[in-house]
Image (cartoon, grey):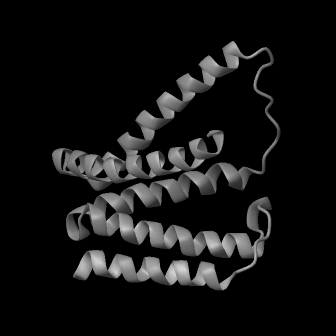
C-alpha cells in the first residue's frame, strides 16, 4: 500500500500543474501582465515555502543542515521555473489546458529520458530502452491528437 502513495502524489502534483496554469493565466488577464502574474505566483509560493521551512525546522530536533551548494543551483532552478510558469501563462489561452498539459508532459518525459541516460545532476544512469522510446512517441502522438483532433 505504501508503494502507491508516491505515484499518487506524483499524479496529484500533475493535477496541481493543470489547475495552476489557468489560474495564473486568469491572474495575468486581471493584471494585464504575464510577467506580473508569474512574479506574483512565484512570490506567493516562496512565502508559503519559507513559512513551511520555518515550521518544519522548528519542529525537528536538529535544525536543517545547510551545506554549500554551488551558486548556479540557486539561479538555474528559479530561472527554469520562471520560464515554465511564464510560458504556461502565455500558452493557456492559445492551446487550452488539456493540450498544454499534454505538451508539457511530453517535454518532461523527453528531458527526463535524456537526464536519466546521461546521469545528469547526480541521478542514476538508466539506459534508453525501446519501451521508453515507444512511451515518448506515444506521448508526442497523444499531445498532437489532443491539440489538433
Q: Is residue 114 above or below residue 18?
A: below
Instruction: Indicate the quadrant containing the C terminus: top left, top right, bottom left or bottom right.
Output: bottom left
In the image shown, does 25 or 149 lie closer to the viewer? 149
Query: What residue is at 70 percent from the left and 55 percent from the top?
Result: 72
Instruction: Indicate the quadrant containing the N terminus: top left, top right, bottom left or bottom right.
Output: top right
Residue 104 at x, y percent in the picture: 43, 67
Which quadrant would residue 131 be assigned to in this image? bottom right
Query: What residue is at 52 percent from the left and 50 percent from the top?
Result: 10
Looking at the rendered structure, the number of numbered marks drawn on it comes to: 0
Q: Is residue 85 above or below residue 102?
A: above
In the image shown, does 17 or 40 lie closer to the viewer? 17
Relative to 6, is 41 on the left or the right?
left
Which quadrant would residue 147 be assigned to in this image? bottom left
Q: Is residue 25 above or below residue 119?
A: above
Query: What residue is at 53 percent from the left and 59 percent from the top?
Result: 80
Residue 78 at x, y percent in the picture: 55, 51
Query: What residue is at 37 percent from the left and 78 percent from the top?
Result: 142
Residue 87 at x, y percent in the picture: 37, 63
Relative to 53, is 60 on the left or the right?
right
Amino acid at each position: 500500500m505504501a508503494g502507491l502513495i508516491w505515484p499518487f502524489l506524483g499524479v496529484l502534483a500533475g493535477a496541481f500543474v493543470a489547475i495552476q496554469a489557468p489560474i495564473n493565466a486568469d491572474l495575468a488577464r486581471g493584471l494585464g501582465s504575464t510577467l506580473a502574474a508569474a512574479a506574483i505566483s512565484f512570490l506567493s509560493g516562496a512565502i508559503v515555502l519559507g513559512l513551511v521551512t520555518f515550521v518544519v525546522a522548528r519542529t525537528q530536533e536538529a535544525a536543517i543542515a545547510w551545506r554549500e551548494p554551488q551558486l548556479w543551483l540557486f539561479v538555474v532552478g528559479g530561472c527554469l521555473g520562471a520560464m515554465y510558469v511564464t510560458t504556461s501563462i502565455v500558452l493557456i489561452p492559445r492551446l487550452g489546458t488539456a493540450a498544454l498539459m499534454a505538451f508539457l508532459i511530453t517535454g518532461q518525459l523527453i528531458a527526463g529520458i535524456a537526464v536519466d541516460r546521461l546521469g545528469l545532476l547526480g541521478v542514476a544512469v538508466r539506459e534508453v530502452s525501446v519501451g521508453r522510446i515507444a512511451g515518448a512517441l506515444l506521448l508526442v502522438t497523444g499531445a498532437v491528437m489532443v491539440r489538433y483532433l
